[in-house]
Image: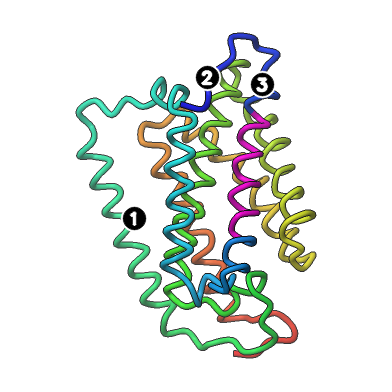
Amino acid sequence: MFHIRPNSEDAFHVILGELLGLWLIANAGYYLIFYTFNFGLSYNTAPITIALYFLLWAGVSIFSFWDILREWLNVERRIWVYGLWSLGFAALMWVLLYLFAHLPAVSGLQVAPFTDILFATPWYFLPKSTEVLVQQILMTILVLELNYRYRSLYKVILGYIVCFGGSHLLLFLFFNPAATVYAAAMTIGSLFSALVFPYLILRVRGGFIYTYAIHLLFYIFLAMALHAWPPPGYIA
């Protein structure tokens, strides 16, 4: 196990650094490995390989912070309920992706991976689902750590806004120089998630499933909107 929760409340910056470091290494590795070995950076052209890559990092995240997660996990006898909810969300996403596949394709300048969602096919959401899984695991650990120290939902939300919103800015500035509008949309989305995700994780049973579904549905609806109403410079 890589991580042991520090006893001192002053050590939150250590855990925050570990979370941020893991996410940045995962993203840096994605660019370095897939570019070096000519796999392509687009989720649309190498969906299975990229999905397996981020699935590996999901496992690394769980293993690295298992001491924090095991205090929170308590499936009891409700695991069948969570299973039904998961199947329900999976069915909803399948229907949405079926509808999405029938929307007109978008044409224009492609700059992978920045424009991936503009040219997304249903395959795009395979690697996206595992990337979102990594984000949700790290996000959950962040919320649990904030709650462990402050025991206040209000303070957890504020800390989440600073940490998660700040990490998006850092990612776009140093590792993903996306268009300003796209970067702003993702950052604003991360800030709005602060109004929902901490509450679901801390107050609702099976909250992780709901946050993961909401997060992935956000990208599906965004892709559908971009295909229906492409931005300037692109046509459907």
| Point 36% across, 31% down: residue | 205
Amino acid type of the residue that numbered disc 2 sits on in the rendered structure = Ile
Separation of residues labelled 2 and 3 (CA atoms): 12 Å
Which of the 4 image quarters holds residue 23?
top right
Give the residue number, with chain letter if any, for mark 2.
4
In terms of secondary structure, where does tag 3 sit? helix
Give the residue number, with chain letter if any, for mark 1.
89
Q: Where is residue 224 in the image (x, y as percent from the top left)?
A: 52, 74
Separation of residues labelled 3 and 1 (CA atoms): 34 Å
Of residues 159 and 116, the one nearer the viewer is 116
The disc, 2 or 3, on the residue closer to the chain's N-terminal end is 2
In terms of secondary structure, where does tag 2 sit? loop
The extreme front residue here reads 37
| Front label number (3 vs 1) | 3
Q: Where is residue 111 in the image (x, y as percent from the top left)?
A: 68, 77
| Front label number (2 vs 1) | 2
